[in-house]
Image (spheres, helix red, strand yellow):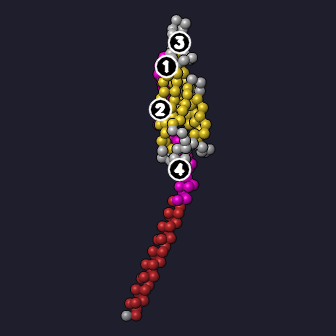
Amino acid sequence: MVERKGKNTRLWIWVAASLGVCACFTGAWFWLQEQSVDAGPGSKILLRETRHDFGLIKANEYKEHRIRFTNVGYKPLEIIHQEADCGVSVEIFPPQPLLPGDSAEIILGISGIKQSGELRGMVTLGINNPKEPPVRIEVLAFLPDRGIDQEP
């Protein structure tokens, strides 16, 4: 009987030690997972499209186009710099910051008031993550000549 008790005791010690080691590794694994989320990339922008052709813009006509974007990073996204070439307007809706996984829209606008001919413009957006390069959206349109005989 005594030997049997000793074998059971050794078995229970082995089971307890095994569970302790497993718990230790499991705890370390969860700790590493939390650390990797915090140490992961910052904000990152994903655009649904990076080019839009407005086509023909008539005199005094205003057109706009919405481009959806998502923050696919692990930290809130802020657009800290936006620049648009002459003839193109840009607006971000809703205002920032944009939490990870959330989406918003960039509203591109163009009007045919003072230009004529082919328009090739660029919109540049810089975000609050210095490791990410600026995002560029190409904008195209055609504005017919506005001769003296045509209405403005």
Residue 27 position, x and y percent, is 50, 67
Stretch in magenta: 34-58
Residue 63 position, x and y percent, is 48, 24
For residue 61, which numbered disc appears in the image? 1
Name the residue: 48% across, 74% down.
20
Question: Does the segment drawn in magenta span residue 103?
Answer: no
Between disc 4 and disc 1, whose residue precedes?
A: 1
Whole-number angstrom distance, CA of label 2 to CA of label 4? 25 Å
Q: Nearer the viewer, residue 105 or 46?
A: 105
Q: Could you say whether the residue bearing mark 2 is in a helix, strand or loop?
A: strand
In front: label 4 or label 3: 3
Q: Which residue is mark 4?
A: 74
In front: label 2 or label 4: 2
Whole-number angstrom distance, CA of label 4 to CA of label 3? 49 Å
- As shown in the figure, which amino acid type bears the numbered disc 3? Pro
Between disc 3 and disc 1, whose residue precedes?
A: 1
Whole-number angstrom distance, CA of label 4 to CA of label 1? 41 Å
Name the residue: 55% across, 24% down.
120
In front: label 3 or label 2: 3
